[in-house]
Image: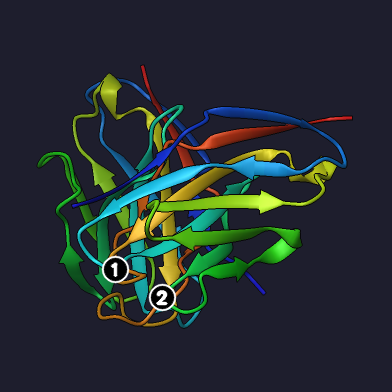
Amino acid sequence: GAGVSQSPRYKVTKRGQDVALRCDPISGHVSLYWYRQALGQGPEFLTYFNYEAQQDKSGLPNDRFSAERPEGSISTLTIQRTEQRDSAMYRCASSLALGSGRTYNEQFFGPGTRLTVL
Amino acid sequence: AQSVTQLDSHVSVSEGTPVLLRCNYSSSYSPSLFWYVQHPNKGLQLLLKYTSAATLVKGINGFEAEFKKSETSFHLTKPSAHMSDAAEYFCVVSPFGNEKLTFGTGTRLTIIP
């Protein structure tokens, strides 16, 4: 079956431009997560949603970063006024059940969007 | 607070020999621990998970890991390496097994023919 998809796979932009990164989770998955992975590092949590509700955005680095999931399915991560330090791989993951509590629900990751800010 | 430390950034082994990737964790809670693998140009894939059941956990592709609370370790092992095991491996901790995962910096595994 179809996994998590992300688009675009590669994005090159100039400093100061806005970018929008899209994540399409596995059908029926209610929780969706965004991570950022710098070169040579592990992914770092940015934010997550249960359905359309943003549950935790503590990992967003500053107010230039925002995310939405208006209909509880596809999500968009938007970076305004991009800076060179925003260059990274942005990964999305989804899980079948709610992201809270003591029940483990595997997060399935997409292939990522490689963002390069010139 | 929680964190994981992967003790080796690169590991090289010959095909057919054992693999050992080391991970130590720090957690205020009784943690859930995972190993994820990342092949080039692919998404992260879950290898195995520990969620307070059996301390020896078996995963896919012949990998296993042992949770040792006294040593705060969760090392990944495989008896015999295969060329297809070449990838980057991440040790991951989570307080409850979901929500935000905290990743280590990764270990790149190279298999020598």
- Compared with B33, A30 (above or below) is below
Judged from this view, the residue extending furthest toward the top is A118
| Residue B41 visible in the snapshot | no
Are the residues under badges 2 and 1 in a single subunit? yes
Q: Residues within 10 Å of mark 1 (few under 14, many from 20)?
A: few
| Residue A98: % across, % down | 32, 81
User: Residue B69 appears at what percent x and percent y?
Assistant: 38, 60
Sequence-earlier tag: 2 or 1:
1
Q: Residue at coordinates 75% horizontally, 45% vertically from top-left?
A: B85
Protein image colouring: rainbow
x then y, percent, for residue A64: 14, 39
- Left or right of B71? Residue A49 is left
Percent of width and height locating residue A100:
25, 77
Left or right? Give the position of B62 relative to A25: right
Q: Is residue A1 left or right of residue B30?
A: right
Residue at which label 1 appears = B30
* Label disc, if present, on residue B52 of the rendered structure: 2
Identify the element where label 2 is drawn. loop
Rendered-image quadrant of the C terminus of chain B: top right
| Above-or-below relation of B102 to B62 | above
Q: Which chain is home to disc 2?
A: B
B21 or B111, nearer to the observer = B21
Which residue is more in the foreground, A113 or B68? Answer: B68
**Please, which residue is most extreme toward the left here?**
A63
Q: Is the residue under label 1 in contact with that under label 2 (CB below 8 Å)?
A: yes
In the figure, B30 relative to B4: above or below?
below
Nearer-the-camera pick, B4 or A82: B4
Q: Residue at x 55, y 49 (%)?
A: A111
Q: Nearer the viewer, residue A1 or A43?
A: A43
